[in-house]
């Protein structure tokens, strides 16, 4: 099977699995609607083959690419084995919920261009759903850790923003920085980079509460 269709099939299977994981929770309706929208958008993107080939182009995973995965996995294991978080002790898991988003946007976005790494992080996002169901399902009065449940949506949004960047300016999606220059592509920021960065940063806060 050609790589482009193989990776597309993997993404579809992953989407069905994650949607099934959240099917029993009434609070997940908004997230599910957003998920269906994002996957519909991704299906449309897959029809634009030239841009989609660039999005899902696999490359070899380097040893140091596993370092951030290992660090986040250690945090995940901690929250999986620890007792259910109470309101008074919520700060660590709330910081963790926000932290994986900011880490993804500002430090990990270059790695996620590799579809092989993206698939690993997508699998990692499924673990976050399990953590949410353990710690957040009974704490509806503080929904700030819903970001754990919705992290996989952010990974899909990342690919959508990449496609838009390719479509609008023939350039990769980048994260803004004070240097006014992207470290991965060694290019100065353009107008579309600033525009596309808005939904990238805004969705971090939106996905924590929906």
Image (cartoon, helix red, strand yellow):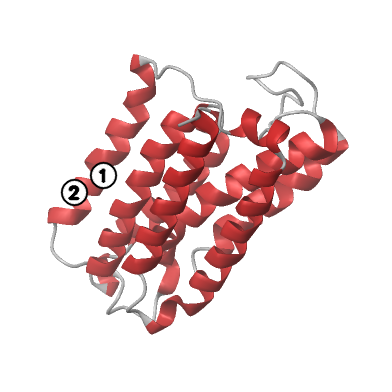
- Residue 90: percent from left, percent from top: 30, 65
Classify 10 Å Cα crowding around label 1: few (below 14), some (14-19), many (20 and above).
Answer: few
State whether residue 210 appears in this view. no
Residue at figure coordinates x 39%, y 15% from the top left = 62
Residue occupied by mark 1: 75
Closest to the observer: 25 or 109?
A: 25
Residue located at (59% from left, 44% from top): 158
Which residue is denoted by mark 2 in the rendering? 78
Characterize the local packing of mark 2: few (<14), some (14-19) or many (20 or more) Cα atoms within 10 angstroms: few
Q: CA distance from mark 1 to mark 2?
A: 5 Å
Identify the residue at horizontal 70%, vertical 30% (top origin): 172
Tell me: 177 left or right of 66: right
Vertical side of 131 occupied by 192: above or below:
above
Whether residue 98 is situated above or below residue 139 in the rendered picture: above
Left-right relation of 60 to 205: left
- Is 130 displayed left or right of 174 in the figure? left
Please name whichever residue, 42 or 158, is drawn nearer the observer in this view of the structure. 42
Q: Secondary structure at mark 1?
A: helix
């Amino acid at each position: 099977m050609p790589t482009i269709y193989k990776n597309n099939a993997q993404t579809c299977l992953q989407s069905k699995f994650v949607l099934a994981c959240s099917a029993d929770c009434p609070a997940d309706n908004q997230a599910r609607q957003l998920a269906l929208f994002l996957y519909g958008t991704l299906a449309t993107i897959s029809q634009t083959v030239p841009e989609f080939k660039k999005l899902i182009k696999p490359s070899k995973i380097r040893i140091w690419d596993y370092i951030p995965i290992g660090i986040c996995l250690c945090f995940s294991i901690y929250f999986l084995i620890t007792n259910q978080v109470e309101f008074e002790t919520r700060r660590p898991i709330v910081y963790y919920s926000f932290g994986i988003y900011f880490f993804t946007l500002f430090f990990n976005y270059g790695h996620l261009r590799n579809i092989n790494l993206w698939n690993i992080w997508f699998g990692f996002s499924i673990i976050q759903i399990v953590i949410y169901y353990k710690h957040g399902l009974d704490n509806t009065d503080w929904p700030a850790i819903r970001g754990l449940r919705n992290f996989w949506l952010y990974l899909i949004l990342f690919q959508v923003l990449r496609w838009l960047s390719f479509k609008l300016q023939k350039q990769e999606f980048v994260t803004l920085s004070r240097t006014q220059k992207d470290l991965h592509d060694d290019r100065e920021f353009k107008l579309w980079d600033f525009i596309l960065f808005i939904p990238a940063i805004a969705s971090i806060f939106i996905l924590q509460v929906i």
